[in-house]
Image: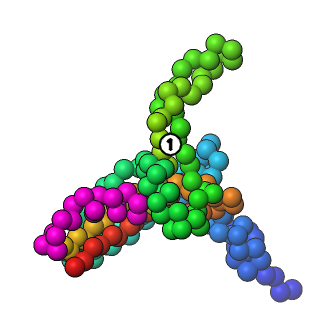
Amino acid sequence: MNKAPQTAITPTRSQDYPEWYQQVIKHADLAENSPVRGCMVIKPWGYALWENMQRALDKMFKDTGHQNAYFPLFIPMSFLEKEAEHVEGFAKECAVVTHHRLEPDPDTGGLRPAGPLEEPLIVRPTSETIIGAMYAKWVQSYRDLPILINQWANVVRWEMRTRLFLRTAEFLWQEGHTAHA
């Protein structure tokens, strides 16, 4: 009697790759889905993998003269409107902030948004527009160049079908932005 080898994870990779992948993430204790739809909690072992990749890449970037910087999580909608063609591909995935506080709702006993913003803010799907605005401010002459910036950040895109580490609504991100004469 010839028995098939038994595996720790079922189904096997060849039987059902998407399910196998999710089981590997679960059994390796890398991450799990959070209570927020499409978001994940990266557990210590999974985050250690990110830190190792980040450390190796950060050294390579710095060896080429790049410096780390951080740009805002919130981007004025007008910035994205200026770059409508660039943003078109993921505009449907943008999260939009329209109010700046909550207040008690006497009708429901819960909370409701209050304090509408003058201009809606987009939760960073990518940073090109805000970085471009800052570069325009910083560069007055060719003598201000080159600018070699790296950013480690998180971005938000409301994905339709999410998979841990592959497609989530919020994910860790590396962006390199340079300007040259």
| Residue density around tag 1, few if under 14, some if 14–19, many if 20 or more, within 10 Å | some
Q: Is residue 68 above or below residue 100?
A: below
Q: What residue lies at 72% left-to-right and 67% top-to-bottom? A: 19
* Magenta stretch holds residue 116: no
Residue 126, x across and y down, in percent: 46, 61
Count of numbered circles in the view:
1
Direction right: furthest residue: 1
Q: Residue 124 at what x, y percent from top left?
A: 46, 54
Describe residue 180's horizontal placement relative to residue 82 as left or right: left
- Is 131 covered by the magenta stretch? yes
- Of all residues, the one furthest to the bottom in this rendering is 2
Task: Give the residue number, with chain letter if any, for mark 1.
Answer: 120
Residue 72 located left or right of residue 23: left
- Per the picture, the main secondary structure of the magenta-coloured stretch is helix
The quarter of the rendered structure image containing the C terminus is bottom left
Could one spot residue 48 in this view of the protein?
A: no
Q: Which residue occupies the foreground of this view, 40 or 76? A: 76
* Region in magenta: 127-144
Left or right for 53, reference 6: left
Quick one: 103 or 22, which is closer to the camera? 103
Q: Residue at x 57, y 28 (%)?
A: 113
Disc 1 marks which amino acid? Answer: Pro
Give me the residue at 57% from left, 53% from top.
94
Residue 109 at x, y = what percent? 65, 15
